[in-house]
Amino acid sequence: MQPVISNDCARAHFLAAHVLAEPPTGPARGADLAALIDRIGFVQVDSINTVERAHQMILWSRRQSYRPEALKRLAERDRALFEHWTHDASILPMPLFPYWKHRFARDADRLHHNWKRWFREGYEAQFDTILNRVARDGPVSSSDVGEGEERGKGGWWDWHPSKTALEWLWRTGRLSVTRRDGFRKVYDLTENVVPATILRQEVDRPALVDWACNAALDRLGLGDEAEIARYWNAVEKTEVMAWAARAEAAGAVQRVMVEQADGSLRGALMRPARLAAGAPEVPGRLRILSPFDPALRDRARIERLFGFSYRIEVFVPEPRRTYGYYVFPVFEGARAIGRLDAKALRAEGRLHIRAYWPEPGQKMGKGRTARLWAEAERLARFAGCETVTAEPDWLRG
């Protein structure tokens, strides 16, 4: 009979695997920061800067001594990290680069099929031109290429051909992001960014599947085959199913039943050692998370496990939005307790709270309100603000 993991226990294992079940203290630069990113697996990069960019908040929520210059130095000087695609643009440990060669080949096939429908013509003719220019003149950004080309007017994805070519060459591994100027990507030849010892490494398909499945399960704590496949978005579910059968036969994983927030049971895989160790204790600390935190990436999983229905309401117009379009999830211990709508008004030196919505059944007494305010003050300092202010009706019922 398969062991049953209670919902409280499952949430604790999940948060521990995502480095959210320990105090956010300790060093956060150099090798310590690289080790933290490796534990998380990947750090999503996003352009929205309502308070602070996603990758910065993800690291700050786990190590509040973290400062953005440490990430920049680790990626751009030490070359301990690289930037590429998981389910979205992400920062990854450099030792994973050999596994991404499979991703480059896969993306080349997929992009060839899709981009001809999505983007204007002419980008393929720019491949050699851009590669030759970078080889001759050094790194470029999208603003450095495409002289004389018509610039898009149709929105975010209406790129000029050379911009599309840059992204293609990056997605397929010919170019790599050497740095970001502000938030703009600057590209160089991959051999100038990735250390030669790593660039030479080759990984066959069985090794890729073995790594992707093991690494995903270790960073999820527990999960089924579909969740493991989605973690890196590097292998197919059928490959995960075959790996799981082999791993279970070898005693490397165990099948369990996990209690969901609604009381139902759902099958999952788990390491026997993790199961035997029991659930870790999750400190009751209150945390403000980025909407793009890796723990929240699988929205359906978060809803099943925590009873927290979280969506960014970007495309929902006022006044039909329940919340602001970009609200920050708030966790306390192993529970999702609310959503915070805040904005850094840096010119005025303040983090302004527009609204806070407690989750159903979560009371906001004096103690919890004080903890939320204290965390908001810590976030304000990280975002370069001196004070926290709030709307008179900021606490919503």
Image (cartoon, rainbow, N blue to C red):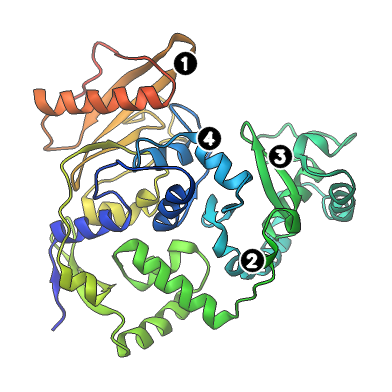
Q: Nearer the viewer, residue 270 or 75?
A: 75
The Cα–Cα distance between marks 1 and 2, rounded to whole angstroms, is 41 Å
Whether residue 231 sits left or right of residue 261 in the image: it is right
Kind of residue indicated by mark 3:
Asp
Q: Nearer the viewer, mark 3 or mark 1?
A: 1
The label nearer to you, 4 versus 3, is: 4
User: What's the amino acid at mark 2?
Assistant: Ile
* Mark 1 lies on residue: 346
Residue 158: mark = 3
- Residue 163 in picture, x, y percent from top left: 76, 43
- Secondary structure type for disc 3: loop
Q: Earlier in the sequence, mark 1 or mark 2?
A: 2
Tell me whether the residue at label 4 lies in contact with that at label 3, contact meaning CB atoms closer than 8 angstroms: no
Neighbour tally class for label 4: few under 14, some 14-19, many 20 plus, Cα within 10 Å? few
What residue is drawn where x is 45% and y is 74%? Answer: 237
* Image depth: mark 4 or mark 1 in front: 4
- What separation in Å lies between label 3 and label 2 (alpha carbons)? 35 Å
In contact (CB < 8 Å): disc 3 and disc 2: no
